Amino acid sequence: MSTLLIRLAAPLQSWGIDKFERRGTERTPTKSGVIGIIAAAFGRRRNEKIDDLLTLRFGVRVDRDGKLLRDYHMAHEEKFWVTFNAVKYSHITTRYYLADAVFLAGLEGEETLLEQIDYALTHPAFPLFLGRRSCPPEGRLSLGIRKGKTLLEALQEEPWQVSDWLKRREDPEVRLPVFIDAGNESISGFVQRDLPISFDQAYRQYGYRRVSGSNSVPVANPYSQHIIARNTTEHDPLRELKEE
């Protein structure tokens, strides 16, 4: 088994859990959202099967959790009746986004399938978005395949995916939350309804998966200013003058 790593970063992203007037977001990318990105990259229509993608083990590392942003949105629509009279309707929706968040997603599975996904993400058939069409990704999505690495190993060993200025402010080692598919043998964790069964707009279906959220992984931060302060010498160029 190998693991494909995907960097999910953007000024705004939203991983929807509600519809209609209130459109919320999970605080981490959902499995259905990431599978949807991959299906779009392959050029699959909403009514096409995604069974092969569901065999992949999924996990997310929270490199920067971002801030929850609330958007007041007024939606308008027109409805035409048999008499061809148009009636305009307006309704308010509340939409939530994650601002300036950075996540590292991992997919563990057969290397042949991961290579196909890697190529599709760098040559997408359809435009890719992080949850909604107003949320295009920042920079390159696929970070490549970590051959022979399990999902947890790949998420632990990959460098921190935030900006250098933020790295300088933090400790030489940071602990980042990790959420991964728990597996049948695990009884810990929580249940989340984001397992896509069908994206067909006429009959969308989502199942449940068990998520292990008790993990946090240590990640080295060689850019930390604390390292520089620790390595400074005690040399005092004015020592001799003080002794006089």
Image (spheres, rainbow, N blue to C red):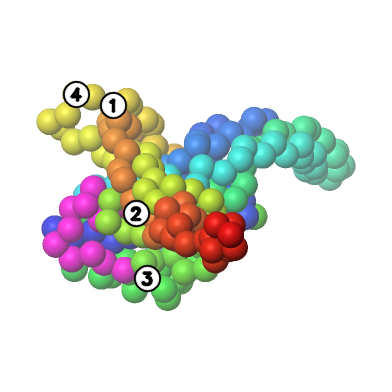
How far is mark 2 from mark 1, CA to CA? Answer: 26 Å
Q: Residue at x 44, y 65 (%)?
A: 141
- Point out residue 117 in the picture as x, y percentages from the top left corner: 32, 66
Viewer-proximal residue, 85 or 44? Answer: 44
Tell which tag, 2 or 1, sits nearer the viewer: 2
Q: Secondary structure at mark 2?
A: strand
Residue that label 3 marks: 120
Residue that label 4 marks: 187
How far is mark 3 from mark 4, CA to CA? Answer: 35 Å
Q: Secondary structure at mark 1?
A: loop
What type is the residue that disc 2 sits on? Ala
Mark 4 closeness class: few <14, some 14–19, many ≥20 residues within 10 Å: few
Question: Would residue 40 appear left or right of 187 to someone viewing this image?
Answer: right
Tell which tag, 1 or 3, sits nearer the viewer: 1
Q: Secondary structure at mark 4?
A: loop
- Point out residue 185 in the picture as x, y percentages from the top left corner: 12, 31
Viewer-proximal residue, 28 or 184? Answer: 28
Query: Which quarter of the figure is the N terminus placed in?
Result: bottom left
Q: Secondary structure at mark 3?
A: helix
Mark 3 / mark 2, whichever is N-terminal: 3
What type is the residue that disc 3 sits on? Ala
Residue that label 2 marks: 220
Q: Residue at x 28, y 51 (%)?
A: 156
Viewer-proximal residue, 70 or 221? Answer: 221
Magenta segment boundaries in residue numbering: 144-155
How far is mark 3 from mark 2, CA to CA? Answer: 31 Å
Mark 2 / mark 1, whichever is N-terminal: 1
Query: Does the image show residue 56?
Result: no
What type is the residue that disc 4 sits on? Ile
- Point out residue 53 in the picture as x, y percentages from the top left corner: 28, 54
| Mark 4–mark 1 CB contact (< 8 Å) | no
